[in-house]
Image: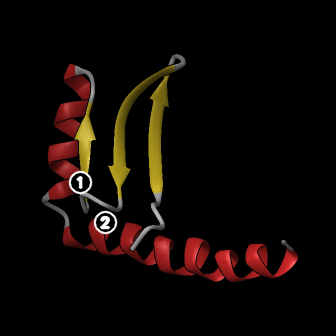
Amino acid sequence: KDIQYVYSEFYNKLEIARFDSNLGKFVGYTEYGVKQANYWNNNPSEISRRKAQREAVCLHNVGIDYQTV
């Protein structure tokens, strides 16, 4: 539970939206980002995809990183 997956969307070097695995949803930071976050949050496959990324990337690699240390 202490592993966090964060996916950010940027436009013109400005973060417009972010998915945070601790929240389990997208959060928008600009007017356009809020609209996109609402769209993505209402799409169950997008939320499932991001949650699966946490499992596939973060949880898989944390074991490798701890073995190296």
Residue 61 pos. (x, y %): 69, 76
Please tell me which residue lies in front, 3 or 7.
Answer: 3
Which secondary structure lies at badge 2? helix
> Relative to 30, is 57 above or below?
below
Identify the residue position indicated by label 2 in the image: 46
- Residue 61 is labelled as none
Check the picture and name the quadrant holding the C terminus.
Answer: bottom right
- The answer to which image quadrant residue 40 occupies is bottom left
The residue at 24%/26% (across/down) is: 32
Q: How far apart in space, not on screen, are marks 1 and 2 (Cα)?
A: 6 Å
Residue under the image location 44 percent in, 68 percent down: 2
Disc 2 residue type (three-letter): Glu
Vertical relation: 26 (above or below) 13: below
Q: Where residue 33 appears, x then y in whole percent?
A: 27, 31
The earlier-in-sequence mark between 1 and 2 is: 1
Q: Where 61 sits versus 43, above or below?
A: below
Of 14 and 67, nearer the camera is: 67
The reply to whether the C-beta atoms of the residues labelled 1 and 2 are less than 8 Å apart is yes
Q: Seen in the image, is 59 located left or right of residue 51? A: right
What type is the residue that disc 1 sits on? Trp
Numbered marks: total: 2
Q: Position of residue 20 (x, y in %)?
A: 35, 53
Apparent side of residue 1 relative to residue 22 in the rendered image (left or right): right
Q: Residue furthest front?
A: 69
Location of residue 13 in the rendering, given as x and y in whole percent from the top left corner: 54, 18
Q: In this view, does 26 lie to the left or right of 58?
A: left
Left or right position of 17 against 58:
left
Q: Residue 40 carries which label?
A: 1
Kindly state the secondary structure of the residue where label 1 is placed.
Answer: helix
